[in-house]
Image: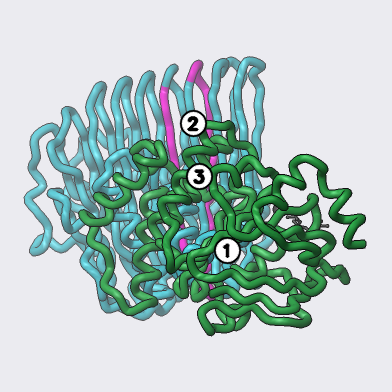
Amino acid sequence: MLEIKNLHVELEEEDKKILKGVDLTVEPGKVHAIMGPNGSGKSTLSYVLSGRAGYEVTQGSAVMDGVDLLELEPEERAAAGLFLAFQYPVEIPGVGNMTFLRTAVNAQRKARGQDEMSAAEFLKVIRERAKSLKIDAEMLKRPVNVGFSGGEKKRNEILQMAMLEPRMCILDETDSGLDVDAMKLVADGVNALRDDGRGFLVITHYQRLLDHIKPDVVHIMADGRIVKSGGPELALEVEHNGYSDILSEVA
Amino acid sequence: MALAKVKQSATQARLAGLTLPTSGWSEPARREALSRLTEMGLPDRRDEYWKFTRPDALTDAAAPHAAVLNADEAPIFDEIDRLRIVFVDGVFDPAVSDDLSQEGVTIERLAGISGSEIHWAKGLYGSLEARGQAPVQRPLAALNTAFATDGVVIRVTGTPSKPINLIYHHENESSDAILHHVIRVETGAVATILENGPAAARFNSCMEIDIADGGALHHVRAQGRDHERKTATHLFSRLGTESVFKSFTLTVNGVLTRNECVIELTGDDAVAHVAGACVGDGDFHHDDTVFITHDAVNCESRQVFKKVLRNGATGVFQGKILVQPGAQKTDGYQISQSLLLDDDSQFLAKPELEIYADDVACSHGSTSGAIDEEALFYLRSRGVPEDEATGLLTLAFLAEAVDEIEDETLADDMLARLQGWLARRR
Ligand SMILES: Nc1ncnc2c1ncn2[C@@H]1O[C@H](COP(=O)(O)OP(=O)(O)O)[C@@H](O)[C@H]1O
Ligand SMILES: [Mg+2]
């Protein structure tokens, strides 16, 4: 469903290569995890896939369901079914969380030629999904992410994902800064969305999250490349020995 | 100091086309205003106070031309039960105005009562304007006091059930209107004044508001969308002990708008809030000039001004808080912000604090910036198209000023107008 081939990315502003040939294919229904040291390019990969400005793709391709993602505007990628849970969710003063979500849901529906969701229907669905993430009515009313704790922000990302029902979900360190309970909530939220048609790319530093969201494939990213791929046992190896063994092995 | 020759002749040229109404109780005040004006001369671009805004179109002898906008949206305040007082190109129109009698308030037309010899407004007419001439001169306000052809004189004694709505239609492409309103809010009385409409091709408006102890006046104003109109307004307000004045102005379009607001907090524990939201495109030029004087203990003043500028539009903010000796426990707040939707637009701000008391809390801030790219990308990554996302962020920016309006219905109406501008892109 998501096919990344030989992706090379540089910064637009300065002459700096960040991704140096990433190859990765996520099949429908599968969970792929990416682990790797800080600065290896994991967030950059997620940003480039979702269309953030400031990066230049110098080689390679990224295709989702046969569509060239790199040709699309960020909103078109979203409407095509791509979702990124941000490592650092953005605060938007003055825009209510609920308004934001309804605007997003309806914009995507419109882009796909579907009818807008009625206010009543939307309210019913969001209440139910917010509840399972322990997001209260107050948090839905507040401006997007403003004054939210780290954990609240991450839960809010998962709520957005649940409302938008994307086909391909990328989670960028959604576990960082979460305590055990919050991580469980987030993992449950993700697991509830798992189905045969949906793909996941879970970026994380820690094995911890992968105890709750069982990956099918684990990739190790270093210096802008996927240097090793394997089963869930690869995550355990990282947990026990750190990255140095793997990195020296592939060097 | 003698007036510069050019200024003198420019002022004389403007005065040549005007006639001072000479009958009744307002005449002495008008003559005094005229002598103030001839001493000061009309502003020109060399004046410090007009550094950012060229006053020419407001002072020219010849009335300017301004196309009349054909309304394409529901009139403002239409949903609200209000007492309507309609002026067309500055001329009162009884046919479309409501009966002026209402519980808790007496409303009279300035033109209708100026014949009588004694009137409660006699001591007030022009007096707050005269006080407001120092330390900064406001010649256009003096011109207004001298030559206003009409206006309303309102005395609030209770709590009128409906807001009083001054509606200014613009029908003539070269009309030149001067209106002067006087409002006295008596002890403990509370009223809401609404103003809307472009008024004329050129509009000079002055409102003097005197609020007695414990009184409150809410003022919400929407200036017309006729883009070519030129407007100069002055609000002069004096606040007694524990009184409240809250004013909000919406400006959508306009090649020249200068809104001056001069507030004196003279009684302890008084509260004055002024706010404004404006949006403009291209040759839009909008100037908010505010001067708040704290001259009593434990008063609060608050200024919140937001401007959205696009395609080379210009926004100006000159705002001053003056805290006089003895005005302890003053709480003064001022924020002016502009959102520049492109690189061609500009925001010129001159925030000032002048404080002569030691136990005060005053803060001011002024910012100017583009749309937050991070927020924009976040919204787009959720599927919201760029235009719509920009609109949401723009509205959120303006909402902080609109939120200053206490009445939710009024605030919603203001937000809807801003949304309309965003949707029309004009
Ligand atoms: N916008 C940017 N400006 C400057 N450097 C950047 C930018 N984005 C990424 N980088 C750099 O690219 C490298 C990869 O960063 P990132 O993708 O955030 O890594 P990771 O998420 O794996 O920690 C780092 O060295 C980082 O400093
Ligand atoms: Mg990262």
Shown in green, the chain is A
Beta carbon at label 3 within 8 Å of ligand 2: no
Q: Which amino acid does the dot numbered 2 rest on?
A: Ser
| Label 2 sits on residue | B301
Q: Main secondary structure of the magenta part?
A: strand
* Above or below, comparing residue A151 to residue B4 in the picture: above
* Circle 2 Cα neighbour tier, 10 Å, few/some/many (<14 / 14–19 / ≥20): many
Residue depicted at 20% across the width and 46% down the height: B164
The span shown in magenta is B270-298
| Label 1 sits on residue | B377
Between marks 2 and 3, how big is the CA–CA gap? Answer: 49 Å
State the image coordinates of residue B51 (x, y, percent, origin top left). Answer: 66, 58
Rendering colour (chain B): cyan
* Above or below, comparing residue A201 to residue B135 in the picture: below
Q: Which amino acid does the dot numbered 1 rest on?
A: Phe
Say which label, 2 or 1, has the lower sequence index: 2
Residue depicted at 46% across the width and 68% down the height: A167
* Circle 1 Cα neighbour tier, 10 Å, few/some/many (<14 / 14–19 / ≥20): many
* Above or below, comparing residue B52 to residue B352 in the picture: below
Dot 2: what SS?
strand
Dot 3: what SS?
helix
Q: Quadrant of ligand 1?
A: bottom right
Instruction: Say if mark 2 contacts mark 3, CB within 8 Å.
Output: no
* Circle 3 Cα neighbour tier, 10 Å, few/some/many (<14 / 14–19 / ≥20): many
| Label 3 sits on residue | A187
Dot 1: what SS?
helix
Q: Which amino acid does the dot numbered 3 rest on?
A: Ala
Q: Is residue B279 magenta?
A: yes
